[in-house]
Image (cartoon, rainbow, N blue to C red):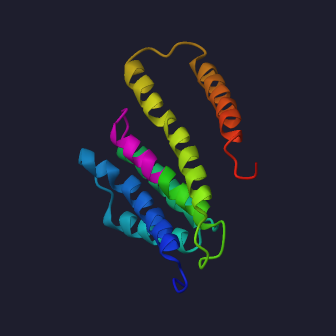
């Protein structure tokens, strides 16, 4: 199945596996390691995700990582979550680029740059959310906070869409 991969395609697929595994194992930095069977299961799903980036194995692997984080920690916020977010986002972006063409076709550098910029913009939300969560930790929940958060997320999404619309390779 790996025959015919260009070096860039191989690098993308290694990045998929590495991103998922970094996200899973990031809880270990806080001393909470996943069970061996979960590591093996997620690693197998991550390899399947790398081999078939358009298939649902990536969703299952990502879902298991997120579930593990939910079981591993009850409180928070934890700075290791930023590493996990970066790992999952990197794996997702590598899968998007890897899925753009057959495995013997090297990815277009402009497409890689486009998705790298998009990923960097999306990742900017993670430290902002972490800082806000840290500042609000232990505070009573004000009324309407979830509605305000949703409104802020929607405004940010629309603004990012306008900003990134000019960087599309179709134009």
Q: Nearer the viewer, residue 43 or 67?
A: 43
Q: Provide residue 32's location: percent of width, then percent of height.
A: 28, 49
46 is higher (above) or lower (below) than 142: below
Tell me if 109 is positioned left or right of 19 in this view: right
Tell me if 153 is positioned left or right of 48 in this view: right
- Residue sitting at the far right: 171
Is residue 91 visible from the viewing direction of this image? yes
**Where the N terminus falls, by quadrant?**
bottom right
Q: Does the magenta stretch include residue 54?
A: no
Q: Quadrant of residue 44?
A: bottom left
Q: Does the magenta stretch include residue 84?
A: yes
156 is higher (above) or lower (below) than 115: above
Q: Which of 171 and 36 is in front in this view?
A: 171
Q: Provide residue 142's location: percent of width, then percent of height.
A: 52, 13
Q: Quadrant of residue 43?
A: bottom left
Query: Residue at 70% of width from left, 31% of height from top?
Result: 158
Question: In the rendered picture of this protein, how many numbered marks are placed on residues?
Answer: 0
Query: Residue at 76% of width from left, 48% of height from top?
Result: 171
32 is higher (above) or lower (below) than 105: above
Query: Residue at 44% of width from left, 23% of height from top?
Result: 132
Q: What stretch of residues is rendered in magenta?
A: 73-88
36 is higher (above) or lower (below) than 4: above
Q: Provide residue 116's location: percent of width, then percent of height.
A: 53, 50
Is residue 45 visible from the viewing direction of this image? no
Q: Provide residue 155's location: percent of width, then percent of height.
A: 67, 26
């Amino acid at each position: 199945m790996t025959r015919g991969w260009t070096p860039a395609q191989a690098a993308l697929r290694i990045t998929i596996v590495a991103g998922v595994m970094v996200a899973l194992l990031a809880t270990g930095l806080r001393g909470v390691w996943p069970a061996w069977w979960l590591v093996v299961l997620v690693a197998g799903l991550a390899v399947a995700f790398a081999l078939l980036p358009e298939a649902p194995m990536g969703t299952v692997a990502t879902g298991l990582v997120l579930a593990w984080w939910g079981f591993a920690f009850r409180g928070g916020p934890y700075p290791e979550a930023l590493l996990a977010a970066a790992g999952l986002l990197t794996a997702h972006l590598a899968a998007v680029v890897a899925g753009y063409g057959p495995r013997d076709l090297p990815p277009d550098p402009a497409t890689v740059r486009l998705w790298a910029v998009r990923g960097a913009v999306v990742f900017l939300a993670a430290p902002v959310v972490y800082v806000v969560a840290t500042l609000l930790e232990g505070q009573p929940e004000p009324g309407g906070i979830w509605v305000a958060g949703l409104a802020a997320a929607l405004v940010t999404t629309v603004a990012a869409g306008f900003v990134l619309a000019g960087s599309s390779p179709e134009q």
